[in-house]
Amino acid sequence: MARDTGPQCKQCRREGQKLFLKGERCFTDKCGVERRSYPPGEHGRGRMRQSEYRVQLREKQKTRRYYQVLEKQFRAYYDKASRQDGVTGENLLRLLESRFDNVLVRLGFAASRRQARQLITHGHWMINGRRVDIPSYQVRPEDIISLKPGSTATDTIQRATELVSTVPAWLQADHDALTAKVLRLPERSEISAPVQEQLIVELYSK
């Protein structure tokens, strides 16, 4: 399974904002964006010419990094979204939000998407009573998410629940029993990702 193993704080600094890639650390003074609010590299503090292409590319890269998706997979999501009925940009965000690893973060069962991926691939979570170890699994309405009986990750997950204040309206979570239900797919107004999806559509439409 391909994954990005590069420095995560540098990714946030490159995009100029917190992408909450490191979970609890992102809420402390140790956050890379808090300590150095300029892009990484030798020319990080230099002036960059903001062309239209650069703005669109940065938006795509920011979205890809926020959801922890590699380039080839992100393009596949866009192609699938463009074939669906409705607005392509909203379809794209809905597909990304419906990923199993992202849903665990939204529910508060994981502090970051990287942690969610690890919990999933190690077989700690079930959907509708069956173990699912694929982070990109697309959840559907009425899916029931539960922790595998006898899981050794209970303490880790309980600590993660302390970082979330609210659960999106399209999800229902029981933080005591560590179970959840997908009520429906999210509307655009319910997706809190710091993304301007129209810029991505314009980039791929060229």
Image: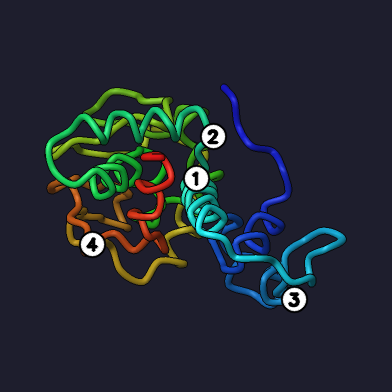
Q: Residue 61 in the image: x percent, y percent?
A: 54, 48
Residue assigned mark 4: 190
- Quadrant of the rendering where the C terminus is positioned: top left
Q: In this view, does 112 lie to the left or right of 82?
A: right
Q: In this view, does 174 lie to the left or right of 30?
A: left
The 10 Å Cα crowd at callout 4, few under 14, some 14 to 19, many 20 or more, is few
Q: Which residue is drawn at 33% across and 54% down?
A: 198
Q: Which amino acid does label 3 sit on?
A: Arg
Q: Residue 126 in the image: x percent, y percent?
A: 32, 31
Distance between mark 3 and mark 2 Cα atoms: 27 Å
Q: Which of 200 and 152 is in front in this view?
A: 200
Residue assigned mark 3: 35
- Earlier in the chain: of badge 2 and badge 1, it is 1
Q: Is residue 87 left or right of residue 74?
A: left
Distance between mark 3 and mark 4 Cα atoms: 30 Å
Distance between mark 1 and mark 4 Cα atoms: 19 Å
Distance between mark 3 and mark 1 Cα atoms: 23 Å
Tell which tag, 1 or 4, sits nearer the viewer: 1
Q: Is 38 rendered above or below residue 186?
A: below
Residue assigned mark 1: 64
Tell which tag, 3 or 1, sits nearer the viewer: 1
Q: What residue type is labelled 4?
A: Glu
Callout 2–callout 1 Cβ contact below 8 Å: yes
Residue assigned mark 2: 70
Q: Residue 116 in the image: x percent, y percent?
A: 48, 43
Q: Which amino acid does label 1 sit on?
A: Arg
